[in-house]
Image (cartoon, grey):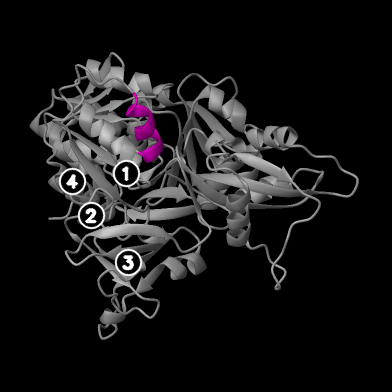
Amino acid sequence: MSELLHQRLLAAAARTPNAEALAHGAAVLSYAELAQQVECMAATLFEHGVGRGARIAVFLEKRFENVVAMFGAAAAGAVFVPINPLLRAEQVAHILNDCGAAVLVTSDARLDMLQDALAACPALHTIFLLAQPAAPSCHGAALLSLPEAMAAAPSRAPHRVIDADMAAILYTSGSTGKPKGVVLSHRNLVAGAASVCSYLGNHAEDRILSVLPLSFDYGLSQLTTSFHSGATAVLLNYLAPRDIVECARAQRITGLAGVPPLWIQLAQQSWEDTASLRYLTNSGGVMPRAALDELRAALPRTKIFLMYGLTEAFRSTYLPPEQLDRRPDSIGRAIPNAEVLVLRPDGSPCADDEPGELVHRGALVALGYWNDRSKTAERFRPLPESAGLPLAEIAVWSGDTVRRDGEGYLYFLGRADDQLKISGYRVSPTEIEEVLSAHPEVAEAVVFGVPHAITGQAGIAMVAPKSGATLSDALLQAHCRRHLPAYMAPSAIIVVDALPRNPNGKFDRQALQRAYCETEPAGSPA
């Protein structure tokens, strides 16, 4: 029988109530304690008028309340929307407004940052804070203490939900415009957790370190796989790579997930006394060979899984560790319960070693983009081979170019659009351009990506000033820091008299990228 996302957690609580579900520093929550808080959170949402399918936004760093709010929303029959804690107020307001969030769970400090921006979020009727609020409301939304509200909420039966219903909306940047909300069902999340657990061999004795943002599908997966297998998820908000190594040692971590820029830093650390580490996983880009070799030398008994995923399908491929020596540049083959195809533009299958688009089919295919039919139709399209069915099967057309070798292993070749991938994050060049163009002395701006040894790609901006204006890299970088999280800020901003255009009058990012790479020394954006 199909399960709902929170039911795995509740089943683990019934089976092993005293087992550790979450750890954060010296604090621990057992499965019984976590289940009780999740059910209490669900009751609190009912008590404050949250209907089936209502969106519950969570804007917090990694902590117990973040996990309780997300899984409590799922248990209530609502939809949780985790928001990256690095985002600025305007970006948070865009997400809240785009998804029509009815409830926001956040902290006093984060609410202070959001005060002005929340005026543009009319659907928001309740804000839960972790402490006693200083005022009764904020721009028409009631301000309530989450602990007090949870203590006062009477229990009641949840809304009726089935596994095809929405469970979460994860916001991710595309190649153009503002971030899009990828809608994931209970079935998507449960099937994804089951698939990942099967090839990682997760079990109840595992202690999985959560260092990635929970708003990132790869970061959320550390929770869903932990609860699926009855393991312990250890939450960490780290400042330096050394913090991760020390936590892995102190917490006897068995599983650790990261993105290439993080692995490059962790490969330089000393990993003595971390014999508990059973596996490492990489996604969000190709791990550099040097970092892979250094990690394998430092952790010879630790299995390393190279993976590929996209938020629209959660996870697509993995390379078994025993294949690392033969094909360290491969992203592997399809994960269990998924099929990955390599197709030409006309939908026909590519031959061996012929470049084509990676297309994912199966139970992990998301429901589409929230409130965006046109973008959904571009990315979620019928498979040609299903044309004879009464309802054609919908797959995710990734936009990524790959090739498949004669043994069925896949190799990532590049993106088909202008989207950037920086430190594992998808970054929209258009979103950065909009921020730069909002500066009162900027006439126009264009952003493109170049290779970077640490972050995978770096964003480069070319900016033309308005007549009579004087601009500098330092001035514009300060402007970007006020309006963008650090990972989205351009690595270099070049001020020019006018921006070149193609014959159609459009910016040609790829041509600008080629010209920049020909004139600048390698690694100069660092």
* Res. 74 mark: 1
Q: Quadrant of the N terminus?
A: bottom left
Task: Give me the C-alpha separation between circle 3 and circle 1.
Answer: 29 Å
Q: Disc 1 on helix, strand or loop?
A: helix
Mark 1 is surrounded, within 10 Å at the Cα level, by few (under 14), some (14 to 19) or many (20 or more) other residues, namely many
Mark 3 belongs to which amino acid? Val
Q: Are marks 1 and 2 in contact (CB under 8 Å)?
A: no
Q: Disc 2 on helix, strand or loop?
A: loop
Q: Residue at x 36, y 53 (%)?
A: 310
The image position of residue 416, as x and y in percent, is 46, 64
Horizontally, is 296 left or right of 140 in the view? left
Q: Where is mark 4, residue-wise?
A: 325
Where does the magenta region start and end? 259-268
* Mark sitting earlier along the chain (1/4): 1
Q: Are marks 3 and 4 in contact (CB under 8 Å)?
A: no
Mark 1 belongs to which amino acid? Ala
Q: Where is mark 2, residue-wise?
A: 332
Q: Where is mark 3, residue-wise?
A: 359
State which mark lies toward you, 3 or 2.
2
Q: Are marks 4 and 2 in contact (CB under 8 Å)?
A: no
The image position of residue 49, as x and y in percent, is 44, 42
